[in-house]
Image (cartoon, helix red, strand yellow):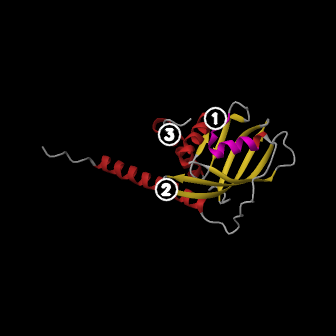
Amino acid sequence: HSPRPRSEPMRRASRALAAAGAGYVALAGYGVWRGFARSAAEPLPPSRSCSSNSPIVATLGAMYGGKGVPLAEGYVSPDVVFEDPAAKVVGEPELREAFRALKIMHPKTIAMEVVDGIQNWEGDKTLEIDIWQKYRLGSFSFTVYSRLNVEVKDNMISRIEERWQNNSLLGHKAFSAIRRANGILSYSLTSLLIHGIE
């Protein structure tokens, strides 16, 4: 028997889903591309990373240095939010999974420098930190410069916004929704697919 032709409503639904999917991919791709767009003001990394007695900076250094999220020290809020041009993760389990999965790219911190907020380590504050990272996938390696905007409340990290090339995140609700959807999807997929890394 030949397959029955699809009804017009089904064809319309299929076209709508295809268009929505294409739009999602296009917006997500543009958001990532925009995040990597080169900035003429990109600073050169310092000859050495900053030395700091801040446990907040030490926690961030461990996370970006491939050691995962050090939860035992108590400097990460259970409701922490992390957002970069690609994804937004919410809550400590999603953050832990995101930085666990990052280990497959062999992260190495080239340099890290606090550029604002260093005056007082106590109380609520916002830190601005420049960080230069090197990543490797197989034989391919690349470097990324980012500006981290870190909100600290009750001496715990409550929000991290990573701006690649120090380009601000696209603020339209559509891009914010896509980043959140990517965060949920990546949390589900990496939990299922990436094993043997703690």
In this view, the mark in front (3 or 2): 2
**Nearer the N terminus, badge 3 or badge 2?**
2
User: Disc number at residue 92?
Assistant: 1
Q: Nearer the viewer, residue 135 or 90?
A: 135
Q: Secondary structure at mark 3?
A: helix
Quadrant in which the C terminus appears:
top right
* Crowd rating for badge 3 (residues with CA inside 10 Å; few <14, some 14–19, many 20+): some
Q: Is residue 21 magenta?
A: no
Identify the residue under disc 2.
Answer: 139
What range of the chain is rendered magenta?
57-70
Q: Position of residue 31 (x, y in %)?
A: 56, 57
Quadrant of the rendered image containing residue 76: top right
Q: Residue at x 51, y 42 (%)?
A: 186
Q: Position of residue 187 (x, y in %)?
A: 53, 39
Identify the residue under disc 3.
Answer: 190
Q: Residue at x 72, y 50 (%)?
A: 149
Distance CA(mark 3)–CA(mark 2) = 22 Å
